[in-house]
Image (cartoon, grey):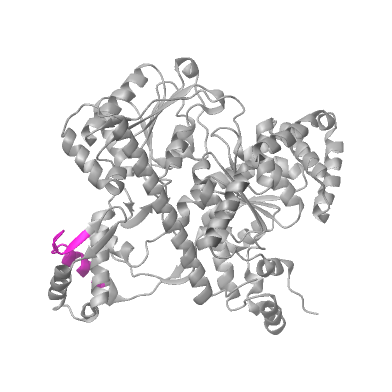
C-alpha cells in the first residue's frame, strides 16, 4: 500500500489561515471581543502560576543529573501523548528552569517564567530590553518540541538565529530534543534536516520563502487526496519528496512587532527572470521624459502616501514627448505608469535613505530596522525606475511565481505566539490580524531610566547643533551615548559633524553592519559614542562598563521621531536595562520627515512663524503636533497592512497556485 510520508501529511493538512478580516458589524463584534479579552487579568494569572513554578525549585535542584533526566523523560512522554494536565505544564517549566541553571548558569526569574507561560498560551509578550527573552523562549519551545511536531523560533536575522540555537542548545539536548538553525546559505538537504529537528531557529524570510518553495514544488496538488493520487501514480516524481518543511505547527516569533507588524507590508515573493529589452529601454526613457515635466503643472505629489498624480496638462505633455518613441509608448496607460514610477523614484526614494548602492546594484534599506535587504526588489517597475535614475544597468522586472505576506503566512500556524520589547502600541492590531492578546510582563528590577521632554527646533541645522552639544556634554561626563537616526544618510551626516568636533565615535548602519553585535555590545563603555540606525535596537544587550552606572548610565538620543512610536520606545529601551540607571531624549525639528509627510500644512505654518531661528521652540503645542503626526502615521500604516492582507486573500481565492484549503 502506498503511503504519504508524515511530513507531507502535515504540510497539506495544516490549518488554513483564519478567515478574511471581518467588516462592518462583524468587525465591531470582533473588536469588542478583543476589548473584553484585554480586561482579563492575564498578567496576574501568569505571575501567580509562575510563582508555583518557582516554588518547585527545591524539588528539582536536589536531583542528580541522572534523576532529573529521568523525570524529564517521563514528562516528555506525557506531552508526546497529548495527555498533560496544567500541573504537568508547571512541572515541565520547573524542570527546564533547573536545566537552564545547570547548563547555562542562568536561572530564569519569576517574570521570565511568567513570560514563558504567556507564550505557551498564545500571547504576544512584552518584555523590556535586557530581560532575557531568549532564555524565556526555551520553556515553551521545549514543551512544543516534546509534542513531536516541531517548533519554529523565528527572529530577525541569521546571526541571531545561529547564536540562539547554539547558546540554548545545551538546554534542549538535556531535555531530549534536537535543535538546528537555518541561515541563508543553507542548501535544501540542510534545510530539510533542520526543519525535522524538534526546535528550529530561523528568520521570518527564510521560513516563509521555504514555505512558498514547497508550495511551488507541490504545484497543482491542492490537498491530501491529490497528494495521495500523485504519490501512487508518480512515486518520487510527484514532487512530494522534495519538500523541506513538515508543516506549520507552532511558532514563537522574537521581535514580533518588527516581523509581524512593521515588515508585514512588503510581501515575500518568489520570482524568476523575464528578459524584455524593449521594457528595459523604456525605464531609462521614462526617467528622461520625467525630467522634462514640471511639478504642480504636469504632476502633483502627495508626500504622505508617496504618490504622484499626472494632471491633464501632464498627460497631454507626456503624449507629446512619447509620440516619437513608438512601441510600448503608444499605450496611454502604460506610458503613464512608466513616468509615474520614474517621478516616484525621483521624489520619494532617496539614496542612503530608502536604498544604498553596492557593487553597482540598488539594495533596499528596511526603513524600520535599518537593515539591508539584498534579496528584495520593489514591485511594478519601481526598482527599475530607481536603477535608471541612478544611471545603473537596468535589470528586467521578474515574473512572480508565488507571493505571500508575512501576515498571511503567520496566520497559517496552528499555534502562534510572540515576544518583543514593544507591543502595547500594536495591541489592537495583534488582535485584529492574528487574534493574539498582548501581555505586558513587569521587569525583574524597577526601571529607573529618566526620559526628558522632547526638544524641538525650527530648522534641521539648529537641531544638529543641539545634538552635537548634547553628545559633547555627556561625553565629557564620561557617559556612553547611543544616538539613533532614521536613515543611513543621517547617520553619515552626524558622523561627519562629530569628526569635525574631534569626538571619537562608531557608526552602525546598513552599510557598516559587519561588526554589528560587537559595536552594540560595547556601546556601554565609558564615554563611548555610538551612532546607529534602527538596527541597534534588536537582539544584543548593551551592558554598562566600569564606573558608568555611577556616572548616570547610558544616554540615548533620538534624532527624529519614527512613524511608529514602538520604534522610538525600542531605541529608548536600550538604556536602563535590568535596573541600570540611564536617560533618554528626543531632539527633533519641524523639518523632519514625519512632519513633512503627516503634518505638512501645520509644520509649514510653524516654520513660517519661527523662521530660521536657532533657538529652541519646544512649546506644548509643538510637541503635541509631533504626537498627533505619529498617531496619524500609525493609522495609515495599519490601513496599508490590512490592504496587503486583503490583497493576499483576493489573490489566494482567484489566482492562488495553492487553491483553497480547509
**Residue 342 falls within the magenta-colored stretch:** no
x and y percentages locating residue 374 in the rendered image? 41, 56
Q: Residue at x 27, y 37 (%)?
A: 493
Q: Which residues are magenta?
A: 281-300
Would you identify the image quadrant in which residue 435 lies?
bottom right
Is residue 185 visible in the rendered image? The answer is: no
**Position of 416 compared to 557: left or right?**
right
Quadrant where the N terminus sits is bottom right
Q: Is residue 296 magenta?
A: yes
Q: How many marks?
A: 0
Is 467 or 29 nearer to us in this picture?
29
Above/below status of 123 relative to 607 = below
Q: Residue furthest bottom?
A: 233
Q: Is residue 132 above or below residue 181?
A: above
Can residue 237 be seen at all in this image of the molecule?
Answer: yes
The residue depicted at 76 percent of the width and 51 percent of the height is: 146
Residue at (71% x, 78% y) in the render: 228
Q: Find residue 598 and report its horizontal and vertical position in percent.
A: 31, 47
User: Where is residue 51, by image quadrant?
Assistant: top right
Image-based side of 411 in relation to 654, left or right: right
Task: Give 426 or 376, whichever is nearer the viewer.
Answer: 426
Quarter of the picture containing the C terminus is bottom right
Query: Eyeballing the image, is 283 above or below 33?
Result: below
**Foreground: 289 or 179?**
289
**Residue 229 position by quadrant:** bottom right
Q: Position of residue 49 (x, y in %)?
A: 74, 36
Residue placed most toward the observer, 640 or 279:
640
On the image, the x and y values in percent for residue 491 come to 32, 38
Amino acid at each position: 500500500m502506498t503511503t504519504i510520508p508524515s511530513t507531507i501529511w502535515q504540510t497539506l493538512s495544516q490549518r488554513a489561515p483564519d478567515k478574511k478580516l471581518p467588516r462592518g458589524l462583524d468587525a465591531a463584534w470582533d473588536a469588542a471581543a478583543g476589548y473584553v479579552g484585554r480586561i482579563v487579568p492575564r498578567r496576574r494569572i501568569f505571575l501567580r502560576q509562575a510563582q508555583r513554578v518557582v516554588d518547585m525549585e527545591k524539588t528539582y535542584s536536589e536531583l542528580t543529573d541522572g534523576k532529573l533526566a529521568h523525570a524529564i523523560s517521563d514528562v516528555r512522554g506525557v506531552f508526546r501523548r497529548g495527555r498533560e494536565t496544567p500541573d504537568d505544564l508547571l512541572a515541565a517549566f520547573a524542570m527546564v528552569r533547573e536545566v537552564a541553571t545547570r547548563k547555562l548558569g542562568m536561572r530564569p526569574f519569576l517574570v521570565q517564567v511568567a513570560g514563558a507561560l504567556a507564550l505557551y498560551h498564545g500571547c504576544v509578550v512584552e518584555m523590556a530590553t535586557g530581560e532575557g527573552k531568549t532564555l524565556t523562549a526555551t520553556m515553551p519551545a521545549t514543551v512544543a518540541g516534546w509534542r513531536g511536531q516541531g517548533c519554529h523560533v523565528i527572529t530577525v536575522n541569521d546571526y541571531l538565529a545561529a547564536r540562539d540555537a547554539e547558546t540554548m542548545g545545551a538546554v534542549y539536548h538535556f531535555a531530549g530534543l534536537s535543535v538546528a538553525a537555518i541561515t541563508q546559505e543553507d542548501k535544501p538537504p540542510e534545510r530539510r534536516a533542520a526543519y525535522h529537528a524538534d526546535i528550529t531557529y530561523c528568520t521570518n524570510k527564510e521560513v516563509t520563502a521555504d514555505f512558498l518553495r514547497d508550495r511551488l514544488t507541490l504545484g497543482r496538488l491542492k490537498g491530501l487526496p491529490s497528494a495521495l493520487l500523485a504519490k501512487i501514480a508518480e512515486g518520487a516524481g510527484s514532487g512530494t519528496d522534495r519538500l523541506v518543511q513538515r508543516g506549520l505547527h507552532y511558532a514563537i516569533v522574537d521581535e514580533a512587532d518588527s516581523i509581524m507588524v512593521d515588515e508585514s507590508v512588503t510581501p515575500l515573493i518568489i520570482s524568476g527572470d523575464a528578459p524584455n529589452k524593449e521594457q528595459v529601454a523604456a525605464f531609462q526613457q521614462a526617467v528622461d521624459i520625467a525630467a522634462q515635466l514640471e511639478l504642480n503643472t504636469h504632476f502633483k505629489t502627495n508626500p504622505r502616501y508617496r504618490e504622484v498624480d499626472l494632471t491633464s496638462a501632464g498627460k497631454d505633455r507626456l503624449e507629446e514627448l512619447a509620440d516619437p518613441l513608438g512601441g510600448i509608448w503608444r499605450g496611454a496607460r502604460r506610458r503613464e505608469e512608466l513616468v509615474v514610477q520614474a517621478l516616484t523614484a525621483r521624489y520619494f526614494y532617496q539614496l542612503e535613505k530608502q536604498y544604498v548602492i553596492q557593487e553597482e546594484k540598488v539594495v533596499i534599506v528596511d526603513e524600520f530596522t535599518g537593515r539591508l535587504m539584498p534579496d528584495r526588489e520593489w514591485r511594478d517597475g519601481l526598482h527599475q525606475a530607481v536603477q535608471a535614475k541612478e544611471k545603473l544597468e537596468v535589470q528586467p522586472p521578474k515574473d512572480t511565481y508565488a507571493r505571500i505576506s508575512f501576515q498571511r503566512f503567520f496566520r497559517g500556524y496552528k499555534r502562534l505566539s510572540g515576544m518583543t520589547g514593544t507591543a502595547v502600541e500594536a495591541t489592537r492590531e495583534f488582535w485584529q490580524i492574528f487574534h493574539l492578546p498582548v501581555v505586558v510582563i513587569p521587569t525583574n528590577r524597577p526601571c529607573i531610566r529618566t526620559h526628558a521632554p522632547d526638544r524641538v527646533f525650527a530648522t534641521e541645522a539648529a537641531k544638529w547643533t543641539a545634538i552635537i552639544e548634547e553628545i559633547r556634554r555627556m561625553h565629557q561626563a564620561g557617559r556612553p551615548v547611543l544616538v539613533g537616526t532614521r536613515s543611513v544618510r543621517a547617520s553619515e551626516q552626524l558622523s561627519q559633524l562629530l569628526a569635525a568636533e574631534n569626538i571619537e565615535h562608531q557608526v552602525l548602519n546598513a552599510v557598516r553592519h559587519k561588526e554589528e553585535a560587537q559595536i552594540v555590545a560595547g556601546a556601554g563603555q565609558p564615554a563611548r559614542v555610538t551612532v546607529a540606525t534602527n538596527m541597534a535596537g534588536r537582539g544584543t544587550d548593551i551592558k554598562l562598563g566600569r564606573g558608568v552606572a555611577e556616572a548616570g548610565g547610558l544616554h540615548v538620543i533620538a534624532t527624529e521621531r519614527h512613524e511608529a512610536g514602538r520604534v522610538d520606545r525600542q531605541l529608548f529601551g536600550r538604556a536602563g536595562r535590568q535596573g541600570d540607571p540611564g536617560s533618554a531624549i528626543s531632539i527633533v525639528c519641524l523639518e523632519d520627515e514625519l512632519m513633512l509627510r503627516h503634518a505638512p500644512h501645520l509644520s509649514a505654518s510653524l516654520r513660517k512663524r519661527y523662521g530660521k531661528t536657532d533657538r529652541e521652540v519646544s512649546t506644548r503645542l509643538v510637541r503635541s503636533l509631533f504626537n498627533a503626526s505619529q498617531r496619524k502615521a500609525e493609522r495609515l500604516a495599519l490601513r496599508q497592512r490590512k490592504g496587503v492582507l486583503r490583497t493576499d486573500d483576493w489573490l489566494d481565492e482567484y489566482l492562488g497556485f495553492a487553491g483553497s484549503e480547509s
